[in-house]
Image (tube, rainbow, N blue to C red):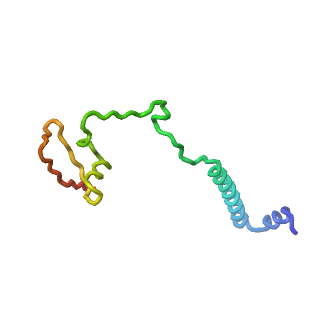
Amino acid sequence: MKTIFDHIERIQGKPHHIRKQIAFGAAAVGTAIIAFVWLVSSVGAGTFALKDTSFAQSTGKEGTFTATGDTTEQLAGVGASVRSGASAPAYIEIIDAASSTSGQKKTEQTTIPF
């Protein structure tokens, strides 16, 4: 069995461009091993795990929600899609509070070009 010094002497006898390839290859393998060990230990320790925190918890204040009056007219986003049904197309409804009447509301589809 050859020692490490025998391998080094054999590599020293090779041309410069081969020695350069071997040096870069050994550096790449060493870097890959170190990166793999670092990644496995970081994942195992939970370094990249998402924490269960929110802005309210980090500031020490809990969020509050106060609803006044009838909020069925103020539904937006998911609430509006649930109200209109899952098979209905999504739409945006703009209600002008100054001139809103309790009569019929006309909904029209809006296309936003990209």
Residue occupying the point 25% across, 53% down = 84
The percent coordinates of residue 51 (x first, y second) are 54, 43
Nearest the eye: 3 or 104: 104
The percent coordinates of residue 95 (x first, y second) are 19, 42
The residue lying furthest to the front in this view is 70
Q: Give the side of residue 64 with respect to residue 60, left or right.
A: left
Q: Give the side of residue 6 with respect to residue 81, left or right.
A: right
The percent coordinates of residue 55 (x first, y second) are 46, 36
In the rendered image, which quarter contains the N terminus?
A: bottom right
40 shown above or below 102: below
Residue occupying the point 30% across, 52% down = 82
49 shown above or below 2: above
Q: Give the side of residue 9 with respect to residue 45, left or right.
A: right
Q: Give the side of residue 72 with respect to residue 49, left or right.
A: left
Nearest the eye: 104 or 9: 104
Residue occupying the point 78% across, 66% down = 11
